[in-house]
């Protein structure tokens, strides 16, 4: 179709008074000229019309077609998230809680004033749980931020818009199919803020920011940070190691404390290697990266460096069972679960004793006097 044909179709639709239909029609025409006309429409559009224009541009970009001014640059092998300095884009991040849940705001300044905010709630295990788009004045944005921080007891920090976009898109990809109904319009809402396709890979900015800390071992003191102390492996994944340690401590064999500790160390190292390997290693690495990023922006740069160094060990395929920090992390988690089970056992009377308990009870009984 020639440019004359495109303009003819455009004039017919405009005469009919259907600007949204214009956008849909142009989005179906696989040409650079159609993309250029949509780009021109976007500059003066608003509301539902702007959304329709951006959807049309997105469809054309999926087919490798962009407005003439942008088409000279070759498409990257892996679509990149918006750069930190993308005009008008910014982001706010909440801390990551014990379940890997956090809130991310992706913000874009409007030409006529005000800010478009894409609000997302996500969790490691659930993916994207809720999403909403709103148009706010700067005053309304400040008020809502302050109110959310007050109610949740957290501080939102400013950060990289590209990272925020990637986090939201990755969470959407991880959302189970049966829970997609409440966030199924995410990609459509996203086009109001970001005009590029969702990124599938990203180099986390924390590595460049904390480059000097990556060569050092992550300090065990990192476990004192609330975000790290709150991290927990699923109970089903860690229970087998807890039971093994209990069996060592309750063994009827005569084991001195040094022998017991030696066997427990073997269990801890094996748990670190297995719990921090494969797909779980990638999930733990991503959480450490995001925690480090938040720490760096909340004034805890030393701890951020330790968390980034720990994430880098997993990124580079290090054997977690040989990293002191990961050994300490696993030991702390095993100890916490073990203490919870002991507390529960004290509160629940048992009718059956373990062999070790039976032997100790027998030894503690007073000796009976012999008969003459």
Image (cartoon, rainbow, N blue to C red):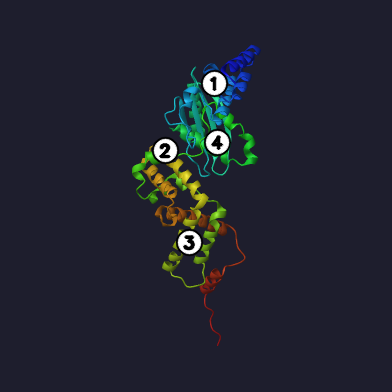
Residue annotated with mark 1: 33
Closer to the observer: label 1 or label 4? 1
Residue annotated with mark 4: 121
> How packed is label 3: few (under 14 Cα within 10 Å), some, or many (20 or more)?
some
Task: Say what secondary structure mark 2 lies in.
Answer: helix
Mark 3 or 4, nearer chain start: 4
The residue lying toward the viewer, choosing from 17 and 122, is 17
Which corner quadrant of the image does residue 328 belong to? bottom left
User: In whole angstroms, how far apart are the C-alphas of marks 2 and 4?
Assistant: 21 Å
User: In whole angstroms, how far apart are the C-alphas of marks 3 and 1?
Assistant: 65 Å
Mark 3 or 2, nearer chain start: 2
Mark 2 or 1, nearer chain start: 1
Q: Where's residue 195, x and y in %? A: 52, 27
Image quarter in which the N terminus is found: top right
Task: Say what secondary structure mark 3 lies in.
Answer: helix
Residue annotated with mark 3: 267
Q: Where's residue 149, x and y in %? A: 49, 32
User: In whole angstroms, how far apart are the C-alphas of marks 2 and 1?
Assistant: 36 Å
Task: Say what secondary structure mark 4 lies in.
Answer: strand
Q: Where's residue 228, x and y in %? A: 45, 46
């Amino acid at each position: 179709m020639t440019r004359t044909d495109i303009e003819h179709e455009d004039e017919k639709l405009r005469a009919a008074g259907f600007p949204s239909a214009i956008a849909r029609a142009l989005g179906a025409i696989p040409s650079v000229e159609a993309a250029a006309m949509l780009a021109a429409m976007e500059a003066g559009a608003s509301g539902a019309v702007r959304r329709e224009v951006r959807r049309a541009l997105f469809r054309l970009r999926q087919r490798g077609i962009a407005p003439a001014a942008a088409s000279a640059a070759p498409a990257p092998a892996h679509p990149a998230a918006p750069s930190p300095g993308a005009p008008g884009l910014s982001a706010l991040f909440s801390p990551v809680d014990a379940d890997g849940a956090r809130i991310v705001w992706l913000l874009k300044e409007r030409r006529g004033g005000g800010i478009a905010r894409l609000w997302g709630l996500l969790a490691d295990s659930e993916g994207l749980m809720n999403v909403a788009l709103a148009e706010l004045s700067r005053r309304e944005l400040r008020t809502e931020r302050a109110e959310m921080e007050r109610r949740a007891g957290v501080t939102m920090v400013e950060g990289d818009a590209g990272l925020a976009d990637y986090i939201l898109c990755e969470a959407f990809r991880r959302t189970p199919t049966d829970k997609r109904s409440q966030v199924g319009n995410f990609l459509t809402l996203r086009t109001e803020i970001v005009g590029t396709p969702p990124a599938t890979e990203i180099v986390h900015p924390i590595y460049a920011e904390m480059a000097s800390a990556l060569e050092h071992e992550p300090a065990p003191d990192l476990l004192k940070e609330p975000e790290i102390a709150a991290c927990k492996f699923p109970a089903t994944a860690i229970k087998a190691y807890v039971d093994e340690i209990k069996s060592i401590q309750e063994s009827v064999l005569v084991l001195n404390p040094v022998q017991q500790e030696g066997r427990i160390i073997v269990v801890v190292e094996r748990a670190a290697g297995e719990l921090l390997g494969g797909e779980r290693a990638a999930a733990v690495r991503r959480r450490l990266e995001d925690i480090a990023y938040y720490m760096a922006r909340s004034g805890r740069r030393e701890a951020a460096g330790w968390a980034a160094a720990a994430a880098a060990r997993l990124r580079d395929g290090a054997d977690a069972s040989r990293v002191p920090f990961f050994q300490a992390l696993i030991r702390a988690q095993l100890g916490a679960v073990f203490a919870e089970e002991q507390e529960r056992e004290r509160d629940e009377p048992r009718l059956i004793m373990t062999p070790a308990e039976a032997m100790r009870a027998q030894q503690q009984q007073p000796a009976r006097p012999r008969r003459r």
